[in-house]
Amino acid sequence: MPTDLPVPAAQAPGAGPEPAAATAAHGPSRRALIGGAAAVTGAAAVSVAVAGPASATPATRAATPDASAAARLTAALPKVSAIPRRARLVDYEVVELAALLRARVVTAVQVTTAYLDRIDRLNGPFETYGDNGLYNAFVRVDRDGALAAAAAADARFARARHTREELPPLLGIPFGVKDSVAVKGLEAKDGSHAFDGNAALRDATVVKRLRDAGAVILGHTVASAFSGSITGTFAGNAWNPAYVPGGSSQGSGVAPVARLAAAAIGEETGGSIMMPSAANGASGIKPSLGTTPVAGLMPLSPGYDVLGPIARSVRDASLILSVILGPDPADDPLSLSAPDPFPAMPLTARTGRRPLAGTTIGIPQTDWMRTSRGVQSGTSPQDTYDADHLAAFDRLKEQLASLGATVKEFPGLDVTVAANDPYFSTTDVLATVDGSPVSPSSAVLSPNRYEIRYWDAVKDFAATRPADQAAALLAQYGRKAPGEAAASFDSATRFAGLIPASVRAEGEHRRRTLQANYQAALDAAGVDFMLVFSIGAQIGLRAGGGFPVYRAYYQLPNALTWPMVSFPVGYDSTVGLPISAQFWGPRFSEPLIVQAALDYQAHYPQYHTAAPPDPVAAAPKLAPRVLRAEPATPPELSNDPLVAEEALR
């Protein structure tokens, strides 16, 4: 029977979504959530080993101690009668699909088949790191595994009608997972055939938690080469494949909006969740460092790396984050820094016409933007936006104010002022090691990499691969020290291992100082969280267009360890590409910023529910197997903090 069909109207009447349950009138304040001060980051290295069985998600125990986590999450699902009729089965949001599956209006096999059918038609050839002629959101798919998981989900639904057993919240929901995250039995290549043969023996902790919650794993979504670019060229933008998709979680940003998956997992070191969410008009959450475990991730910079959800709606992303967050003591020590239990993530919009009353949202005026003329310091960010983005920004401010929020400009923290920022963009050199300068951020991140055998692990893998792969890996990860004739893995390891403990401690002290200074800037202005635009003008074509206007300090939230949420707020008037906004708050303020974005989408659903037109296939512009299809990433567009921060200096 056809699978890409709307749910029968008789079974899904409803003119619009209604909250299944209301939270407190205005939710907890920022100070109640984080104690009025920014949490700080320790120096513990993140293990890249894959975790064993995940513990029960702790996110909800404090809120409902007598109910299981799954029961609280499923209790927030909408009633079938309140779900609006969507044009196609693939247009329903995760929470809507979860409700429809429980009511047996649709089956998990139908839902999974609908997404696989669209992947067959619209994704293009797999294992292609380049323009494959279509979306190229998925670089590989586990069709048999996905259909088997969907059939197993349907069996559980059928059995529960008789046993009344508790069903997990994501049962039967199809997901994509970034190409740098371990999925048992699949290769993970981090955007390059240089990692051919890197097969996962176990699921990453986050993937295991998704499976435990019933999710159907469709396969891997394409990543920028070595997760190295915030613009990306491998995938095509969900709204027009001729334009950049954002990176490095390219496919994870495209797949949910293009209706190739219900949701996806992205990874961010510096902009890698926010940029593809913004470019494609997805709703994505970049969690605070430590909120979600990263065991099983191919790391870029432990101490910055985070995994988070990308979906079509903020409530979908919040539900997914509720499932995957929580400590992983065995394999990710940094996850022990988060509150346990974590404050419950909001899953429904607050009632009333003014749900944001009592919330103060600040617009930082020193959050400088980068244009073709360089970093525009001394200029309000809004002054750099193109006409469409400025109109959307002004409209968003009015919309937020109509919902009760106080929206105001405030200085923020100008990180070009040395006294404000001794860590992120400073030109200070803390030491010279093995002939190379050690910046404050390198003093933190290089030892973190050393402790997880970052370079040695790649060296060991390269030794087992053909010569072309080994050469590509050495070119990416090797170091050539002053006076050395050639780059080597050993040189990189030596440099990081020789950084003195005192220098590392100074780097971490400076990072804490930056965090405290930024928190003080918010507190002085009475701001709960910030509103920014990561992208300030129409994005460019994949053929060298990039981002004409974007935040110069897109790495700063990762340096601070603070969370962000991205959500669409409009479309440009020429190509119809999405315009997106971001809320950005102190560490572990996810419930606060997500609730505000969820409230916004409940009142203005037209932006996140819109669907792009299906693309017309074009001839692939690149041979299927190349070791690096993207041009070398300009330093200012790199996801690697040590590269991007050096460009700022």
Image: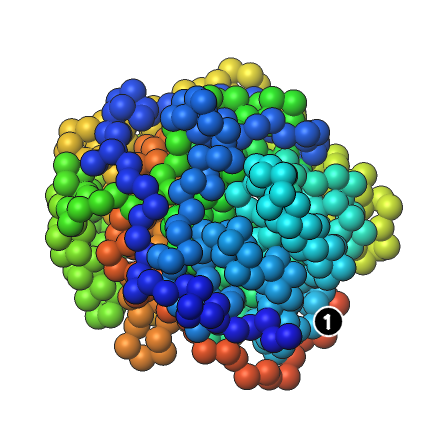
Q: In the figure, 335 relative to 12: above or below? A: above
Give the camera-side residue of 319 and 240: 319
Image quarter of residue 389:
bottom left
Give the camera-side residue of 341 and 565: 341
**Amino acid type for the residue under numbered disc 1:** Pro
Q: In the figure, 173 relative to 306: above or below? A: below
**Which part of the image, by quadrant, shows the C terminus?**
top left
For label 1, the residue is: 624
- Secondary structure under tag 1 reads loop
Residue 61: x percent and y percent? 45, 24
Residue 343: x percent and y percent? 39, 28
Residue at point 44% right, 64% down?
11
Residue at point 34% right, 46% down?
20
Left or right side of 249 for 60: left
Image quarter of residue 312:
bottom left
Residue 176: x percent and y percent? 60, 55
**Which part of the image, by quadrant, shows the N terminus?**
bottom right
Give the camera-side residue of 483 and 369: 369
